[in-house]
Image: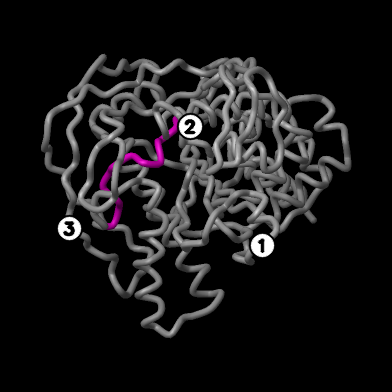
Amino acid sequence: MDARRTVRAAVRVGTALASAAVLVATGFVWSLHQRVDTGAVSSAAAIPTPRPTPAGEAFTALLVGLDARTDAQGEPLPPAMLDALHAGPDEGQLHTDTIILVHVPAKQGEPAAAISIPRDSFVPIAGGRGTHKINSAYRRGMQGAEESLSAQGIEGAELDRRAREAGRRTLVATVEQLTGARIDHFAEIGMAGFVELTEALGGVPVCLKAPVRDSYSGVDLPAGQHLVSGAGALAFVRQRHGLEDGDLDRIARQQAFAAGLAQRVLDPSTITDPARLERLVDITTRYVVLDSGWDLEQAVSQLRQVSASALTFHTIPTGRPDLHTPADGIAVEIDRDAVRSFVGSLLDPGTTPPATTPARPEAPTTARPAADDDPLTVQPADEPAGTGSPTPPSSSRPVITAEGVPCVD
């Protein structure tokens, strides 16, 4: 194997851990390139035009946590594992419960940002698929492709593979339209991979302001600091029932968890334990999907220069958290202009977002499926029309950094 192939394979292992904390932990990634060769699943459609990131050039990655009952190859998870995860009934929806943009700067010492997008954000879905919760973009892209591909006689594993590719591309395009950011890279991990990752790291430190117990997610913890792993870690980041701000409080949980995860990955014991390294490689191979253009041989030197203290976690501005929608139930109100201004200020620190901008509910648009001869086509979404009473967007939630373990609700 040549050195270039070795570096590429090893970097894919580390990056696929699907959290901003893991992207920062590139000392660990760098150490792997001399030890492992993996068969991680890659996506040619998530980023159709590969965008190499040479040294000295910033880039933005989309990290996705998928509510999937399969591994990266599409093989079903064992029933016992699903029960342990409190996964609930399989409705075949493939929702993306975690959506995070991570911006890695070009120069050492510059701030890196992880930007969370609430799963219930009510936004236009790329490809003219109407205005819906953003966590359904992946599934809606899949469904449109399945109809077209099935009509061509494609079935079985190939149908599933190509439909998922369409789902990834639809999600990427939807996030790009919402934020105005150009996404250079993509990483996806399922529930089982997340669980095994936390176990391989020996748990992740978290802190709760008050005791929590939720039968839906399975979380049951007293107040204070804890080391969570496996199904317990998944329950911690998935809970939204019983939280005052629902999905927005869950995002704070996810960000605090990512801060703790950074500490575990950066711990010297992680990169000096061969057995732990091998297990991390195995998890990545089974549960991770990366875009085929992720050439981190060129970008790894940038990643190594980002310290935990330089990485901050943010959430896009949101309006009403109880927006009534025609067909999607209660959603989170979003003003695309406010979101673009906010994201732009983080990707380009020289700009400053407005303090407040009236948020307006986005009216549903008429679904327009992708072209039948190209299931991966993503057409521009219809422009939303403003209706209802304006609600000022909020982006004033405390900023979490990857330095320390913050206590959350």
Q: Amino acid at mark 1?
A: Pro
Residue at x 24%, y 32% (from the top left corner): 335
Residue 374 position in % (x across, y down): 35, 70
Mark nearer the N terminus (3 vs 1): 1
Task: Give the magenta part as a residue range.
Answer: 115-127
Q: Residue at x 44, y 53 (%)?
A: 49
- As measured in the structure, the alpha-carbon distance from the residue carrying label 3 to the one carrying label 2 is 31 Å
Q: Nearer the viewer, mark 1 or mark 2?
A: 1
| Left or right: 317 as drawn, with respect to 260 | left
Q: Which residue is mark 2?
A: 250
Residue 199 rendering spot, x and y as whole percentages:
75, 40
Residues marked 3 and 2 touching at CB (< 8 Å): no
For label 3, the residue is 366
Q: Residues within 10 Å of mark 3 (few under 14, many from 20)?
A: few
Determine the image quadrant of residue 255. Answer: top right
Task: List the residue tagged with mark 1.
Answer: 79
Of the numbered discs 1 and 2, the one sitting upstream in the chain is 1
Residues under numbered marks 1 and 2 in contact, where contact means CB atoms less than 8 Å apart: no
Helix, strand or loop for disc 2: helix
Q: Tell me residue 38's x, y (percent).
A: 74, 54
Out of 168 and 404, give the one closest to the viewer.
Answer: 404
Count of labels in the image = 3
What amino acid is found at the position of numbered circle 3 in the picture?
A: Thr
Q: Residue at x 83, y 45 (%)?
A: 35
Mark 3 in CB contact with mark 1 (< 8 angstroms): no
